[in-house]
Image (cartoon, rainbow, N blue to C red):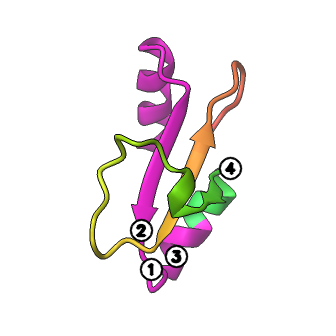
Amino acid sequence: MLGVLVSFCRENGIHSIYLGTVTILKAALRFYERNHFVEVEKENLPTRFPLMNADNVFYSLHLKENQTV
């Protein structure tokens, strides 16, 4: 499913993916990190990022031309 999202983003000129999650979801954190997401501070999120009250960990993935996920 992540591969489909990345393909969609590339086809539509989207160069970065941002997401929020919670620290208790350890498997999710490992999944994102294994797939090249990098943790970012809440203050460094795009201004239009839809914040959820529960989220306390944030990640970004900057898509490179030939990067596979």
Local crowd size for mark 4, using a 10 Å CA cut-off: few (<14), some (14–19), many (≥20): some
Q: Position of residue 53 (x, y in %)?
A: 27, 72
Looking at numbered disc 1 in the image, what kind of residue is underneath it?
Leu
Q: Residue drawn at (56%, 52%), measured in percent from left and top?
A: 44
Residue type at numbered disc 2 = Thr
Q: Which residue has dot 4 on it?
A: 36
Residue stretch rendered in magenta on the structure: 1-30
For residue 21, which numbered disc appears in the image?
Answer: 2
Closer to the eye: label 2 or 3: 2
Rendered location of residue 63, percent (x, y): 63, 30
Contact (Cβ within 8 Å) of mark 4 with mark 2: no
Q: Are marks 1 and 2 in contact (CB under 8 Å)?
A: yes
Does residue 66 lie above or below 33 as drawn? Answer: above
x, y percentage for residue 37?
A: 63, 52
Label 3 or label 4, whichever comes before in sequence order: 3
N-terminal of the pair, mark 1 or mark 4, is 1
Q: Secondary structure at mark 2?
A: strand
Q: Residues within 10 Å of mark 1 (few under 14, many from 20)?
A: few
Which dot, 1 or 2, sits closer to the camera? 2
Q: Which residue is mark 1?
A: 25
54 lies left or right of 69? left
| Dot 1: element | loop
Assess whether mark 1 and mark 3 are in contact (beta carbons under 8 angstroms): yes
- Is 22 one of the magenta-colored residues? yes
Residue 27's label in the rendered image is 3
